[in-house]
Amino acid sequence: MRGGSSPVNDPDFDVPPRLPGRARCAVPRRSFLAAAGLGVLAGVAGCAPGAHRPVAATYLTTSYDDLYPGVEMFLGKARALGGFDFDVFPSGQLLGAEELVPGMLHGVADLVLQTSSYVSSSFPILGSLELPFTTEDFNRYLRACDPDSDVSRLINRALTGQNLRMLGGMATGFEYLWTIDRPIRTPEDVRGMRLRVAGEIEGETVKALGGAPVFLGSAELYQALERGTIDGMMSYLGTVVSRDLQEILRYGTAAHFGAYTVDAYCRNDWYEALAPQQRHALDEAGRVLFRDGTAKLVDVHEHEYLPAVRDAGVELIELDEARLRPFRDAVSAVHERWRALLGDPAAAQRALQLIRDA
């Protein structure tokens, strides 16, 4: 999670490991006024009698040309196949980025589209797809992310115990190390650097390389780079271009330093209570999000974002096998910490092996 305490551990949320459907009407206090001001609280929180329009929320904005089309594809398919009449709240209008999943578990939303890096510390099985250098073949990584893959099935079995279900997601591409003043070619080059990260595993990776992780929202990045508050960042390509950071950054080291997905999540009990046709519609929407959403993302990256970065004069540094090896060795501690956090050695080994074999 980003800086400060995790919302799941925040007393304002007090999320139990499992919620009994809509029996509780608990709503996080910090979200109460926002939801009430939007006039949706009674229907959203499930405290009013009768059916309500399902609520979908995301922090993503339309400025993410690579990600937001996937959100629209997902919602469109769910509407077409399942008859869902969603109230949709984008751009953090209902819940902020860190509040989406905790708020959903409280019944403030029925479905959220969220970046896995925000929630993998609370749902550590998701970290299996975020770890550095698990696979350096992006096509293999994509196969692992498929909602119908053995990896996704394993993840959902683990999430069920926390009343969460992952319907499908977009793979955003590998995260690179981006810097202003000097390039990164060896782990030693990272030492002492202040690098922005967006999740706990990213932070552990930067620490393993000798840097200092800084947790900042993406809206703060341009000013932080411009002022020298940070020396660079770990991120996927979309964050760079959507925030015009190619105007400031000068170097990008291209390797699998991390990864994450943008997933559609819902409560498992809500999903199980739906009619079979609606469950099928959500599953198919998850496949569309993964397949067509990721295809759109890759197209935007190849034909718009990468040219924009190169045209701005950012040098992309490719590492050969000999130069990659010290990075892999350095981040092995990140894998071990994740295994300990998961607390299930057999599941950890199974997840990593499935990703490598995908």
Image (spheres, rainbow, N blue to C red):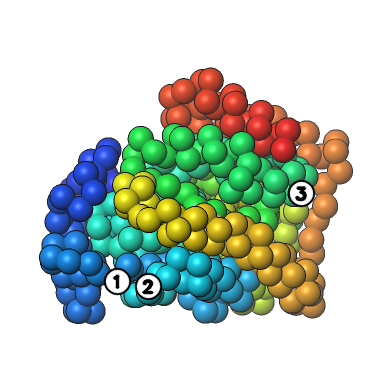
Q: Please count the marks in the image.
A: 3
Q: Is residue 114 left or right of residue 311?
A: left
Question: Residue 245 in the image: x percent, y percent?
Answer: 62, 72
Q: CA distance from mark 1 to mark 2?
A: 6 Å
- Amino acid tagged 1: Arg
- The label shown at residue 309 is none
Q: Which residue is mark 3?
A: 139
Q: Which residue is mark 2?
A: 86
Q: Secondary structure at mark 2?
A: loop
Residue at numbered disc 1: 53
Q: Earlier in the sequence, mark 1 or mark 2?
A: 1
Q: Residue at x 53, y 69 (%)?
A: 77
The amino acid sitting under disc 2 is Phe
The quarter holding residue 265 reads bottom left
Tell me where residue 328 sits by quadrant.
top right
Determine the CA span between mark 3 and mark 1.
38 Å
Q: Residue at the spot x=66%, y=32% of the render?
A: 354
For residue 189, above or below residue 315: above
